[in-house]
Amino acid sequence: MPCPSRALVVLAALVALASSGPGCAEVGTIELAPSIEAPPADGMTVVELTAVVAAAELPVPDGTRVSFRADDAVLFGSRDDARPAFTGARPAGWIELDAATRASAARVFVLAPTEARDVVVDVRFSPEPGVELSEAITLAFGPPPPVAAGAGDVASAGGVDVHFAFACGADNVGALVSGRPDIVVPCRLVLEDGAGAPLPHTPVRLFAEAGELLDLPATPDAPRAVFHVAPFPLTRYPVDVAPLPLEAAYAQAGAGLIPGALEQNPRDGLVTLLAVARGAEAFRDLDGDGAWDEGEPFVDEGEPFLDVDDDGVHDPAIDGPMCCDDNGNGVVDGPNGRWDGDVSLGRVAHVLWTGPVAEGAGRSVVTGPEVIAPGGTARLTLTAVDANFNPVAMLGDDDGLELDTTGPVELAAPDIELADRLGMIVVDAYPQARFGDGAPAVTALVVDGVRAFSLDVTDARGGACAPATWTLAAEVRHSAGAELGGTAFAQRVARLVTDGTLSCP
């Protein structure tokens, strides 16, 4: 058989190319239909994508292979495969997936992304040997649904069902201790709609005064996880803030744990953390229609910002630039007097960064009377703080305080627990804490039972009086962080000693 001419080969190639384009009626067709138009990018919605295929305008045999390809791993073979094993998990899909036809239709299931974007799916099948048809569809996933700040009786703080919250699992970590491993603190986000249904994949913007906040997306085996991390060595320290009047007794000029600080005071170690999500302000749904109506009471919130000096007022020179200028007027605004259904909502957490036990300069010491009269008692005060006058982190299993005495005395002390303590009264939780109310976050320092402890040393000589001496030693054992994932923290020990005499008449 003679070889075809070069012209015939080129003509055949052109015919084949012309017959392989999408929707070519001569050889076959592909029609694509999603089950949902404009689905939300909530990370949970599943869109059924149906491809109806035909060959030369005739149905194709059942079992014909149709190939689907997406620009992300969001394809699943069944709706059940696209469902998480538990609330908050997120199944892993496929980028490429084949499906077999039944009654000329092949189906795949597309899991919504977690941020608004287009997902392009390309579909291909061969109506006859050597011919491949292709068709593409763009699934436009809209913005994720807004979270709800809360619901219920908004007239009282205790009556609000909170649907958006943020908190971390430690009040006090030894981030200002040198020569340690990285400190990782698990944090918790609550993200729900107005009915209390979870929205676990809602985008959240995270801000940290010091260290960093990590947001790890959900996997098939684990829910989303947020961590506050204080790496070593540190690259971002807490901001040096001027002492408040309530800190007057615990402030000293000069840099200490914070490089370049003008003075040392407790709030120098207080790290502000901020979580921001788009959401709806809380309201009381009086008519039960699920929507805010004129006249229904609501909780008005201002624009959130990272309040590093804890005074409730945004100062760009201290707090840094604004993060959430919803109305674009260039300033951080307070409550606007109207209910908002899609604005930036902010939730705050605080973690105290502390250093090792600091002795001297009015910090860690045992003070009190040195001379105990016959049958008398000396009331001593044990103070154990770091250079910022804060209680040290006590996160190891064997951390604590051990007291020993020598001489003919008896020690009476209340149960002393040196534990994970903030050492301040801080208002974080919504709705007690709301942006725009101008209230400071720190309302008081806690001294007794946190920074200072009372100890009673009593004469125990008995019988004839003979002069004697006594000592009291306090051993403070503390660890900068808690073991997590096999990371161990060395325990540090500080020994504070005082002594005196037992007198006779």
Image (cartoon, rainbow, N blue to C red):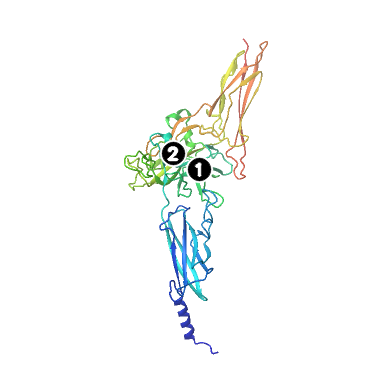
Residue drawn at (50%, 61%) of the image? 108
Please indicate whether residue 415 sits to the left or right of residue 43 in the image: right
Helix, strand or loop at mark 2: strand
Number of the label disc, if any, that sits on residue 34 = none
Residue drawn at (52%, 32%) of the image? 390
Q: Quadrant of the N terminus?
A: bottom right
Give residue 361's position: percent from left, percent from top. 53, 29
**Residue at image mark 1:** 188
57 and 135: which one is in front?
A: 57
Give residue 505's position: percent from left, percent from top. 62, 9
Check disc 2: other Cα within 10 Å, few if <14, some if 14-19, many if 20+: some
15 and 383: which one is in front?
A: 15
Q: Amino acid at mark 1?
A: Arg
Indicate which disc, 1 or 2, sits on the residue closer to the N terminus.
2
Q: Nearer the viewer, mark 1 or mark 2?
A: 2
Furthest residue to the right?
Answer: 463
Number of the label disc, if any, that sits on residue 161 = 2
Check disc 1: other Cα within 10 Å, few if <14, some if 14-19, many if 20+: some
Residue 308, visible in the rendered structure: no
